[in-house]
Amino acid sequence: MSLHDTMPANGLSPFAGMDAASVLAHRARQFDDRPLILWAPFDGPERVWTYAAFLNDVQELAGGLSARGIGPGDRLLIHLENCPETLLARFACLWLGAVAVVSNAMASAAELRGMIEQTGARAAITQPRLSSTVHSAGSGLLDWIAVTSTDAGESAGAETLPEPGDLFDALMGAPAPQRAPDTAQLALILFTTGTTARAKAVVWTHENLLWASSLGARQQGFRDGDVAQVFLPLFHVVGFSWTFLPLLWVGGAALLQPRFSASRFWSAAQRHRATISPQVPFTLGALAAHPVPERHDFRFWIVNRQIPDEQARFRVPGIVSAWGMTEMVSQPIVGVQGDGDLPAQAMGRPSAAYTIRVVAEDGTPVAPGEIGELLVGGVRGRSIFLEYDANPAANAEAFTPDGFFRTGDRVRQMEGGALLFVDRIKDVLKVGGEGVSSAEIEAVIRRAAGVQDVAVVPRADALRGEVPVAFVVADLDGAAAGDALRDAILAHCSAEMARFKVPREIRFLDALPRVGFGKIAKGKLRAMAAEAQP
């Protein structure tokens, strides 16, 4: 059975005769010497790639990959932090018809080996700081490994650099010719943000990339000439498919930084006149400790909910709130101010490009104001991912009998139609047979004096089935309180909630672990809760 046979019967594709490579070639002809990437490393000189220069490097890298045995359908692991090379490598794969396997740069060797085994990646591109991890993970599996000359712009030590022939720059070869476009061809594999179980490999087609480019630009409001400040990881969807791809679609530029730096944010934004920036709760909190310049050029920031207080503090004219996940490619829920009622904390409203349902456990729709699971309907391989790679069981579990994707997120439709995120289904505890929302416990603890942030997860219990464990980040006043703060939180919870909802344990952390679009890594916290307290 061909890939075309797996695509749903849903009419003609709006992208027939196109693919990601042909769009890049067209934009390079259209915009030529206009900047596409404004590379602003923390160590070393800034550099600009125009549309034409980026295409030229992509073609030469594709030629070099072809000479090293990478061809249509082959899979290349790209294990890099934010840097121009990660984008060049992805588009070189797209140019060849190969599949870019994009891994989380923080993955351990064991996790990375699982990704290589699962996807069948033949070779890898990485950076000096990560090369030992890739060599360990890929031993006996990868044909070759190429390494960039810097660590996301930072000078690498001589001991971490490979032989000259294994350098990324040595991959450049004679430009590869453009192939015939194939919208349905596999393009990219990204990984879910799971941490306790093996991350699922999410397969995107070229049509998925074009969908993310065009829809993301249209419904978020990207314009010709926009400059988006990109510091969130490009191995997640927010940095790549929510931001970089829409920029390419409209003729904008990416102000690319290796990672977030609160002290460098405003200077870079002003220097390059950034107009758009994706943000997450952590970055917003860090920026709050720095002065906001009197003038800046931002039109809007992209966040996961409406944040009127922060919007006023940073003097940003607009907030685009959105919800999505790796499987969704773009944003099934989006909130653009002025398009209907968008109260504080709302994620947004259902996108006109998807079908949204909110259902009870038995699959029946819930009434507005009630909590239910968010289901998303779309076209596989176009508006939502094609499949989980080599995982038929996960594919079967992910969809309802009528084809809706089960997100695992619980939401509530607010008055006026906007949607509010409540929690993950897996974050609903069963304590002695009683259902308890972790979000409810978190809301109570967050109101306690001395608490800056909190996350609650279940821990197995022989008597009750599960019990709540709270991970707390103390504010500056409570940072040194220790047992006194713990006792105060427990007393506060006992006064506010039924006894079975009160956490059985409270642990203090300097910061909550996060993944993706600022989401708390509850999988990691569940693993920590299962371990005995040292």
Image (cartoon, rainbow, N blue to C red):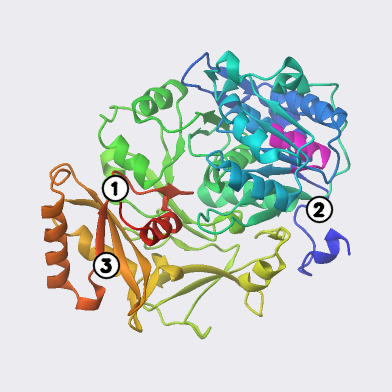
Q: Position of residue 360 (x, y in %)?
A: 47, 82
Q: Is residue 347 left or right of residue 175?
A: left
Q: Quadrant of the N terminus?
A: bottom right
In percent of the image, x 51 and y 85: which residue is there?
Answer: 364
For the residues carrying marks 2 and 1, which lies nearer the camera in this image?
Answer: 1
Q: Amino acid at mark 3?
A: Ile
Q: Is residue 214 visible?
A: no
| Mark before the other along the chain sequence, 3 or 2 | 2
**Magenta region, mostly helix, strand or loop?**
helix
User: Which of 483/234 is in front?
Assistant: 483
How packed is label 2: few (under 14 Cα within 10 Å), some, or many (20 or more)?
Answer: few
Q: Is residue 461 visible?
A: yes
How packed is label 3: few (under 14 Cα within 10 Å), some, or many (20 or more)?
Answer: many
In percent of the image, x 70 and y 46: which residue is there?
Answer: 116
For the residues carrying marks 1 and 3, which lies nearer the camera in this image?
Answer: 1
**SS label for mark 2:** loop
For the residues carrying marks 3 and 2, which lies nearer the camera in this image?
Answer: 3
Q: Is residue 35 left or right of residue 431?
A: right
Q: Is residue 70 magenta?
A: no
In percent of the image, x 88 and y 39: which residue is there?
Answer: 179
Q: Which span is picked out in magenta?
A: 89-99
Q: Position of residue 391 (x, y in %)?
A: 70, 63
